[in-house]
Amino acid sequence: MTGPQNDFARTSANVLLVGGGHAHVAVLADWTRRGIPKGARAVLLTPEPTLRYSGMVPGWLAGQHGIGDGLVDLAALAVRAGVELVLDRCRALDPEARVVTTAEGREVAFGIASFDTGGVGRGAALLGKDPRIVEVRPIGAFVERLAGLRASRQGLARVVIAGGGAGGVELAFGLRNLAGAEPRPVVTLATGTVGLLPGFADSVRRRVAKALARQGIALVEADAAFERGTLVAGGQSLEPVDLVIAATGSAAPGWVRASGIATDAGGFLSVDAHHRSPSHPHIFAAGDVAARTDRPLAHAGVHAVFAGPVLAANLRQALAGEAPQAAYYPRWNNLYLINTGDGSAILSYGPLSAQGSWVLALKHAIDKAWIAKYAALARGA
Ligand SMILES: Cc1cc2nc3c(=O)[nH]c(=O)nc-3n(C[C@H](O)[C@H](O)[C@H](O)COP(=O)(O)OP(=O)(O)OC[C@H]3O[C@@H](n4cnc5c(N)ncnc54)[C@H](O)[C@@H]3O)c2cc1C
């Protein structure tokens, strides 16, 4: 493992993985099981030695998981996979010269590169600047900040969550049921004018709205924004507020568009069904940093997870000098299990919905199995 303290100014790799995200862990798993294609030198460039699984964060808030649960050990996986780990972050990409420049000024030259860095928060852009705003991305920094506030028992009495997608909804439930907090935080969920859970079935929305009301979480279906230091939504003040959590979706990191590689209108890295750049075929991407050119694909962990094995197969073929064959086509419906923080959860699968403690048990089983799979690989089991 090398870190910023290391003075190598230049590294080179046949294959460079940028970001230890939900798709790249599947690539590391493939290389661990089957080996890296012969002779290839592989580097993983990512700022943290672990990946935090966001799906378990609301459960951590509600006291269902410890802070150490829900982590994938990227450093151990890299060792098992025979990959050099560089703990640093991508700051710039030159797709023609095939060089990534890191925040610490190192240059990493590559033959083939794959990007799975996730998106960046856009709370300040949407809400305006205020010291009480905390971005949920990057999720590791979010957990550290919340852990600090919990330990000091300060700054969590009155919380507004901005963003009515599944992440924002789960965080509202998690904070309302914050383990060890007495009294429980007063929580408001401001969804924006798009409303609660856009894209979900009406039956799911109804169940979630009922659960919010039952738990005393205020629902404001209007855009929240700071006006002269006051948080307002729909013409009403949401003050007093101690903390504003921006769960307002991913923005593209600025270095993607700045690189000159093909992007969509939002600046996300364009990829085809093989997760390959149409402008630079030696570059691949998956997860929230990528945008499919052939279909809209929500920025959700489930797509990063399912695209991972496809990416692994295509990187293997590209390294062998072959055209990538594997394609990721999302299922018609994906299973979402929304933790309501009170020992129950709401299931969403296309038009179907269900609710109960058994849904939460199913969620815990699926989440823990995903983490356990990588823990076993990292141990060499
Ligand atoms: C509270 C919450 C709950 C959620 N629950 C769900 C859910 O149940 N189901 C679901 O489908 N989605 C869920 N999501 C969305 C999900 O978290 C994201 O869609 C998912 O994490 C995206 O995965 P990714 O691989 O693109 O990026 P990430 O998981 O964010 O991983 C990115 C990796 O890249 C690294 N990195 C970042 N910047 C750089 C850089 N410049 N250079 C190098 N490395 C970098 C990071 O350290 C990290 O290791 C939830 C989100 C939140 C906030």
Image (cartoon, grey):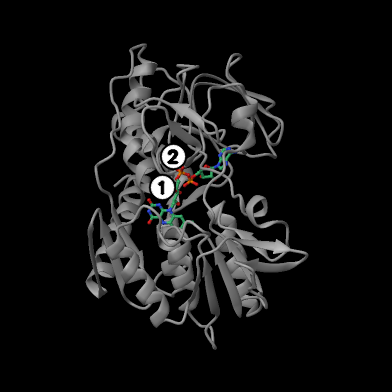
Q: Position of residue 347 (x, y in %)?
A: 27, 63
Q: Residue at x 53, y 58 (%)?
A: 247
CA distance for labels 2 and 1: 7 Å
Q: Amino acid at mark 2?
A: Gly
Residue occupied by mark 2: 287
Q: Position of residue 2 (x, y in %)?
A: 60, 37
Q: For mark 2, give the secondary structure.
A: helix
Q: Quadrant of residue 174?
A: bottom left
Q: Residue furthest front?
A: 235
Q: Is mark 1 within 8 Å of ligand 1?
A: yes
Residue occupied by mark 1: 300
* CB contact under 8 Å: marks 2 and 1: no
Q: Quadrant of residue 281?
A: top left
**Residue 238 visible, this orientation:** yes
Q: Residue at x 41, y 27 (%)?
A: 293
Q: Residue furthest right?
A: 228
273 vs 73, left or right, is left
Q: Is mark 2 within 8 Å of ligand 1?
A: yes
- Badge 2 crowding class, 10 Å Cα cut-off, few under 14, some 14 to 19, many 20 or more, is many
Vertical comparison of 112 with 56: above or below: above
Q: For mark 1, give the secondary structure.
A: loop
